[in-house]
Image: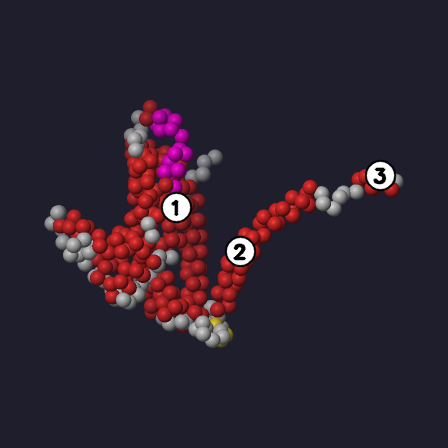
Amino acid sequence: MSAATQAVTKKPFWSSSRRDALTFYMVTSPWVIGLVLFTVVPIAYSVYISFTDWNMLSSPNWVGLKNFKDMVDDPDVAHSLWVTTKYSLVSVPLRLSIALFFALLLNEATKFVGVFRTIFYLPGVVASVAAAVLWQWILNPRFGPFNAFLGLFGIHGPNWFTDPDWALWGLVLMSVWSVGGEMLIFLAGLKGIPRMMYEAAEIDGAGRWQRFLKITLPLLSPTIFFNLIMTVIGSFQTFDSAFVISTARAGAIGSPLKSTLFYMMYLYENAFKFLNMGYASAMAWILFVVIVVVTYLINRSSRKWVFYGD
């Protein structure tokens, strides 16, 4: 090949592919830098801190696995984990059932659908602290409207947030307040089910309940699976509403009598009240492992009940 031909075929340094690559790196670099600085580095530092004794006022002191060993002997760790698990076992099915019920109603509605969607979703955008204050009034045993409603049927309502036997169930009841997000996702899933399948089932004589069991639930199972995963993760991270209600009543986290001592609240107490950040970091990683295990088990079970079609 002659020198003149080589000059013609030589690829220019600023070719279009290199310009595209440079543009890609320039556009994505702010996100990558933010991810490294505000996510990767804090995660890595949290791992290091979990093996230290650090009060945030002096240098971290390496203690190895001591924090994790202390958690085994700490009864409040097991208690807070049990409170969180008990709350999740009740609130997650309740939230998903009510969200699906409202989504089914809105899917059948023909008038004022937008208005009803807004009304049902509105509590989901209310600040959790404001919602906690509101529910303290709703469930007030002396003048709250919920106990007054129960009184119409001759039922004497409990002292919700001041009774250790009822405080956690009051928070479960409160969790139903904000099912708007799950409801909208369910509604989107319902809109994706072809109407012709219902029409064919009606021609074959299938009733409403049979259509729900044989068509709606199987085709909605991927949406149920997604909502289940997200709601379980959120329930294990419950903090703000329980923190506001328990501290507002008695000034102590998890009151009354630690009946609402969620795992995240005990973690917060160790980190910012006792200034035991190493122990709190170890607790955070144990919670991460618990959530990963639960998510893995749900994902494994999905092979038997989630239908993705052919």
User: Residue 5 bears which disc, if any?
Assistant: 3
What residue range appears in magenta? 185-201
Asked whether residue 77 appears in the rendered view, the answer is no
Could you say which is closer to the camera, residue 259 or residue 112?
A: 112
Could you say which is closer to the camera, residue 139 or residue 218?
A: 139
Q: Name the residue under label 2.
A: 34
Q: Is residue 100 magenta?
A: no
User: Residue 227 bears which disc, if any?
Assistant: 1
Neighbourhood count class around disc 2 (C-alpha, 10 Å): few under 14, some 14–19, many 20 upward: few
Q: Where is residue 117 in the image (x, y as percent from the top left)?
A: 33, 39
Upstream in sequence: badge 1 or badge 2: 2
- Give the secondary structure at mark 3: helix
Q: Is residue 213 above or below residue 86?
A: above
Residue at the location (48% across, 65% down)?
Answer: 46
Residue at the location (65% across, 44% down)?
Answer: 20
Could you say which is closer to the camera, residue 46 or residue 199?
A: 46
Asked whether residue 308 appears in the rendered view, the answer is yes
